[in-house]
Image: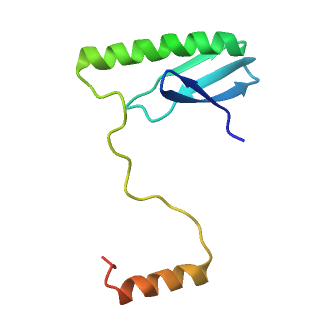
Amino acid sequence: MINTMKIEDYKAIVQYDPEIEMFRGEFIGLNGGADFYAKDIDGLRKEGAISLKVFLDMCKEDGVEPLKEKYLDKFNIQIQPKLHAEIATRNVVIGKVK
C-alpha cells in the first residue's frame, strides 16, 4: 500500500523513516523536489503546505512550470517471454516496429 497525502491539488507520497523517527512526504509530478518532514500527520500537513508554497513561489519567480510537462514515452515492464514474442510478432505484422 502506498500512502499518499493531498495538499491543495498536489499529491505527496508519505513514508515513515524509523532512523529519524519522523514521517517524510515528497510531492510527486513536480518539476523539481519538494519534500517535508514531521513527527505526526497534522505536522506533516502543515510542513507540506509550507514546502509546497515555497516550491510554487520559486517556480513563479523563476518563470518555471511547476508540473512535469511530459513524462517519458517509454517505461519498462517484465513480461513472460512467450507474450513478448507474440507482441513483437504482431507489431511486425502491422508495421509498428521501428
- Colour scheme in the image? rainbow
Q: Going 56% across and 29% down the picture, which residue do you hit?
A: 12
Q: How far across and down, in percent of the image, does residue 86 sit?
A: 52, 85
* Image location (x, y in percent) of residue 26: 55, 27
Q: Choose top left, top right, bottom left or bottom right for residue 39.
A: top right
Q: Residue at (28%, 17%) from the top-left corner?
A: 60
Q: Residue furthest left?
A: 63
Q: Residue at x 43, y 13 (%)?
A: 53
* Quarter of the N terminus within the rendering: top right
The image position of residue 88, as x and y in percent, is 45, 82
In this picture, is 50 found above or below 2? Answer: above
Q: Nearer the viewer, residue 20 or 61?
A: 61
Indicate the quadrant where residue 70 lies. Answer: top left
The number of callouts visible is 0
Judge left or right: residue 56 versus residue 22. left
Residue ID at (45%, 26%): 33
Task: Determine whether, in the image, residue 68 is placed left or right of residue 2.
Answer: left
Which residue is at the far front? 9
**65 displayed left or right of 71:** left
Quarter holding the C terminus?
Answer: bottom left
Is 67 rendered above or below residue 38? below
User: Which one is in front, 20 or 16?
Assistant: 16
Q: Is residue 8 above or below residue 73?
A: above
Q: Position of residue 57 (x, y in %)?
A: 34, 13
